[in-house]
Amino acid sequence: MDYQGNVIRPPSEANSIILQVTVGCSHNRCTFCGAYKGERFRFKDPATIDTDIDYAASHYQRHSRLFLADGDVLITPQHRLVPLLEKIRTRLPRVRRISLYGNCKSIGHKTLNDLVELKALGLDRIYMGLESGDDGVLSTICKGSTSEQMIDSARKVRESGIFLSVTILLGIGGVESSARHAINTAKVLNQMALNQIAALTVMPIPGTSLHDDILHGRFQMLDKIGILNELKTLVQHIELDKVQFQANHASNFLPIDCRLSRDKAATLSRIDQALAGNIPLMPDYMRGL
């Protein structure tokens, strides 16, 4: 398989075929992200993708899941994306679930009918990065979208029947905006009517704007207790039924995998136990992005 640059996938796609269709990220301006810095966003040559599909057909015959990389494959024009999904369906008939990253901008470029068409061709899941539901925080981190735009995009995905997983970033508001970030993020999530919430914890990456802000005292990071309190506030304000909530990414201090609202009381109790020191937190040397 031909892989160029940093190929990033969600943790839940660990056992999927990874087919790289684009290189880099079409936005690539978020202050906290260093995954694609210095990488020019581009679409890969169709012949290279065809060769990779042939390789997957020969070597991954038992795999039923496929993830289209890189950072924002959904930005691919419909006239290129539809034939690609058709090829996957024909040449990888065992694949039953196709997933990809899609940001607010790329979802906005697709009509509802476009998404319904992609769903019919096997696109089952879109991973979308919300990071925060607070417009002040979104502006500061240069996310490029407002909370209302995020909500509209999420609702369009859900209306198409595609599974929606939304990522949020604990600590991205810093000490000053922690409570506001948690409460407003929960409010936006409640309006998205999504299937899954994935919570990560911010980790400063050298070379990013966020890292520079920390070094120069413009951004104050939350400590472990601050992150746990923010997590608690977030969970308290989420009012969704039957949504999967995961904070089991390697960046998190306290692994959580639950179903809200069924497990809400137990989850809050677990966070309280961690705050009281009764549950050990993930040591820093075991945490990573």
Image: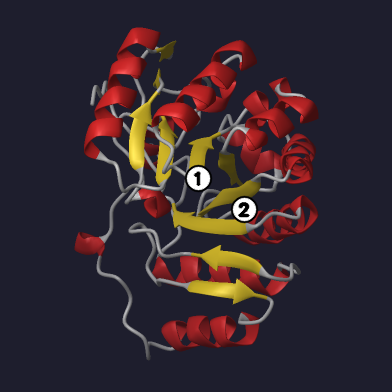
- The N terminus is located in which quarter? top left
Residue 288 seen: yes
Q: Label 2 belongs to which residue? A: 177
Task: Kindly identify which numbered label has been placed on residue 157.
Answer: none
Q: Is residue 250 left or right of residue 242?
A: left
Q: Callout 2: 10 Å neighbours few (<14), some, many (20+)?
A: some
**In the rendered structure, are the residues bearing label 1 and label 2 in contact, judged by CB atoms less than 8 Å apart?**
no
Q: Residue 11: horizontal and vertical position, in percent? A: 38, 52
Image coordinates of residue 123 in percent, x first then y, are 57, 37
Residue 231 % position (x, y):
55, 68
Which residue type does callout 2 highlight? Ser
Amino acid type of the residue that numbered disc 1 sits on in the rendered structure:
Arg
At mark 1, the secondary structure is strand
All told, the count of numbered labels is 2
The answer to whether 266 is drawn above or below residue 95 in the figure is below
Question: Between marks 1 and 2, how big is the CA–CA gap?
Answer: 38 Å
* Res. 205 image quadrant: top left
Question: Can see residue 28?
Answer: no
Residue bearing the label numbered 1 = 97
Picture layout, residue 269 above or below residue 250 = below
Residue drawn at (42%, 38%), measured in percent from left and top? 67
Residue drawn at x 38%, y 12% is 44
Q: Residue at x 43, y 50 (%)?
A: 202
Alpha-carbon neighbours of circle 1 within 10 Å: few (<14), some, or many (≥20)?
Answer: some
The x and y percentages for residue 248 are 41, 65
